[in-house]
Image (cartoon, coloured by chain):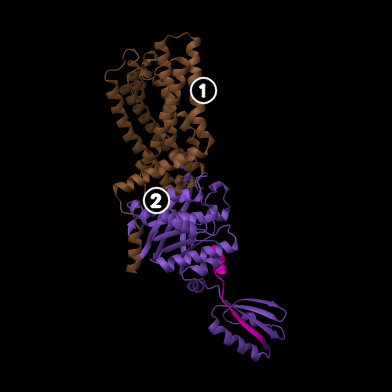
Chain colours: A purple, B brown
Amino acid sequence: MLAVDAKDLWKTFRSGWFGRRRKEALRGASLQVPRGAIFGLLGPNGAGKTTLLSILATLLLPDSGSATILDHDVVREAGAIRRRLNMASGNASFVWSLRPPEVLSFYGGLYGLSGRRLRTKVDQLIEQCELGPYAKTEYNALSTGIKQRLAMAKALLNDPEVLFLDEPTLGLDPDVSIRLRAQIAALRRERGTTIILTTHYMREAEELCDEIAFIKAGRILAQGTADELKRQIRIGDVIALRLDPAAPRGLGELPGILQLQARGEHVDCTVDAVDKRLPEILRWLYEQGVLVRDCQVHEPELEEVFVELAR
Amino acid sequence: MSSRADVFATARVPETWFVEVVRTWAFARRNVIMARRNVFFVFELTFWPGVAMLSHGLLTRFLVLDAKMTAFILVGTVALSTVQVCQLDVAYAVLFDIWSKSMKHQFLTPIGIRHMAVGSWLVGVARGVTVFALMAAIGSWAFGFDFVGGGPGSLALFLLGCCLCSLIIGLFVCSLVLLFGTRAETSAWAAVNFTVMFSGIYYPVSVLPEWAQAVAAGIPLTYFLDAFRQGYGFEAQFAHAWLKGFALTGLYVVLAHWALASAITRARRTGLLLKLSE
């Protein structure tokens, strides 16, 4: 069962006189997200992440292609989607004079909540997002972190089945980010909410997401779990060695060694497949009479996958 | 998984007529809160209408106008201020979100144009009537002008006509803002002045050149002013002025709704809806 099914989405923004200036934001982006998953959408600035999310959130119309959210078409059935979806972004903003409970009451009203049900929901979200001490502060006077918490509370007003989080921890203190990440994980665990998350923090994506898609120049370049992406991109594992004496000549020419960095007795060998290459390297070193004093294997970080794909 | 689906289904609010009222009321309540907390609302409600009434009233004294001509001018003055204040509230349904860059949140929710238009218009009606009462009090106290001179029924129809004209102007302003972005926000204050020239606010439309009279005949406020002034002894310039005014109003409300719906669709296509949230 798919929560999001987008196929071959294209979007070009036109500006200037008679729309002469054109910027292709999406170029055939396709994306499938299973229900109940936390899905990461990664990519460099201007890659098309926000454009893709905005089309899926019914805020933007695609030039071509199709997309469904919970089996509703994003163009023809926007109303049905909006009842079941919500979105919070890192740079969210609300009307300046409203206080947090008033912001939540306003949007709650737009979702049709009223009376005791609205009050209970607002109180619950104020407590859940720790907004109680700021209940009497107008929006303009809130700090960035509190504004972000309020955006998150707003995004939960309609108990969304699909939640889009566009860089939700942008500019937040580490402790607030940790709590927000815990809240996101709890949403999926306790309610089964499908969450699509864009972020520039790779650790956040690796910690939270079941699956990740990498978007660049309006196209999805790769999709899979963090481990699958690391394997797909083949940036290799690193075998860190401490040798006595220092690295002998010829080590870099062994098959499967993608990169070699030597600093005195320390040598980092980036290899294509650690399972196969480690015994070969150790055997060769033994044959050369080199003593291996230490040997460690490092898997590549998601950040390295990101850098490789963004190149 | 089915139990989780049940959780979501239970949490959703069924679409009923009551939900329509709740959504409409949310916009009305927001405008009321904003009106209480922002000083420019006080100026809109008291200062500008007060200044307009006093300065125009004094002008009638300077020009030594008789009671009938004074009524002509002051009816125009009060109509303009009432329409201006009431239509601003409708425009605020979009302008608040533009000024605070929160436009997308509103359009992420399952609302229709009717909710934002009617909700904010209801507050506009309340503010418009307040402005009318204030100006009536000033006019009566300072210049001895009787605003119920045309009869209570005529006054009620006139106020209703002014408020409906405000709804139309407010919706067109919202459309312009969603078509052209922040460049068009000044239309919220400028649009109503279109009626000053053509609707016979300070002079009868008969003094206008022929082409301008044709334009005036397409504006509902022209008919409402004409009908209301008949109560003060002025000759009718249009037959069945009330009927024509309300018929035109109905037509323009439909057109304004269509224009705003088209502007929203265009803003979703061009990305303006997102730009207005950044």
The span picked out in magenta is A293-311
Mark 2: amino acid: Asp
**SS state under label 1:** helix
**Which quarter of the figure has residue B130?**
top left
Q: Nearer the viewer, residue A135 or A108?
A: A135
Above or below, A285 relative to B172: below
Name the side, left or right, on which B107 lies relative to A291. left
Find residue A71 and report its horizontal and vertical position in percent: 32, 60
Is the same chain shared between marks 2 and 1?
A: no
Find residue A80 and report its horizontal and vertical position in percent: 33, 54
Q: Residue furthest front?
A: B141
Find residue B253 and report its horizontal and vertical position in percent: 33, 34
Judge whether residue B78 is colored magenta: no
Report which residue position mark 1 lands on: B51
Q: Chain for mark 1?
A: B
Report which residue position mark 2 lands on: A63
Q: Chain for mark 2?
A: A
Name the side, left or right, on which B235 lies relative to A148. left
